[in-house]
Image (cartoon, rainbow, N blue to C red):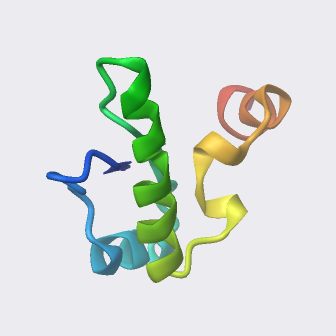
């Protein structure tokens, strides 16, 4: 699931993000940026995740490429 950090959207609420965490669903952050200045919206996703008590392990964007391959791409 994604927390869309665009301020007028913030599609995944903190409550929904917390429910996803409790179900073991990983979250990604996206800025929905169409211009470079839109990348600054990332702070809104981080704030939403903090309200949901998400940790680094819950946010797939926080994983290294090696961790992503190990956890999700190799079985």
The x and y percentages for residue 47 are 47, 68
Question: Compared to 68, does 20 lie above or below?
Answer: below
The answer, for residue 52, to whether it is visible in the render is no
Picture coordinates of residue 52, whole percent (x, y)? 45, 79
Count numbered badges in the picture. Answer: 0
Q: Quadrant of residue 36?
A: top left
Left or right? Give the position of 47 relative to 10: right
The reply, left or right, for residue 37 in relation to residue 60 is left
Q: Quadrant of the C terminus?
A: top right
What residue is at 40 percent from the left and 45 percent from the top?
41
Q: Seen in the image, is 4 located left or right of residue 49? A: left
The residue at the far front in this view is 37
Work out whether 39 lies above or below 60. Answer: above
**Residue at image x 49%, y 55%?**
43
User: Residue placed farthest to the top in the image?
Assistant: 35
Residue at 72%, 34% in the rendered image:
68
The residue nearer to you, when weighing 35 against 66, is 35
Q: Image height check: is 6 above or below 23? A: above
Question: Residue 7, position in %: x, y?
Answer: 24, 53
Let me know if residue 67 appears in the view.
yes
């Amino acid at each position: 699931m994604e927390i869309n950090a665009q301020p007028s959207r913030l599609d995944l609420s903190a409550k929904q993000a917390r429910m996803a965490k409790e179900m073991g669903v990983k979250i990604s952050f996206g800025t929905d940026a169409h211009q470079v200045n839109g990348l600054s919206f990332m702070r809104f996703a981080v704030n939403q995740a903090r309200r949901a008590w998400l940790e680094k392990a819950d946010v797939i964007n926080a994983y290294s490429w090696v961790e992503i391959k190990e956890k999700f791409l190799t079985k």
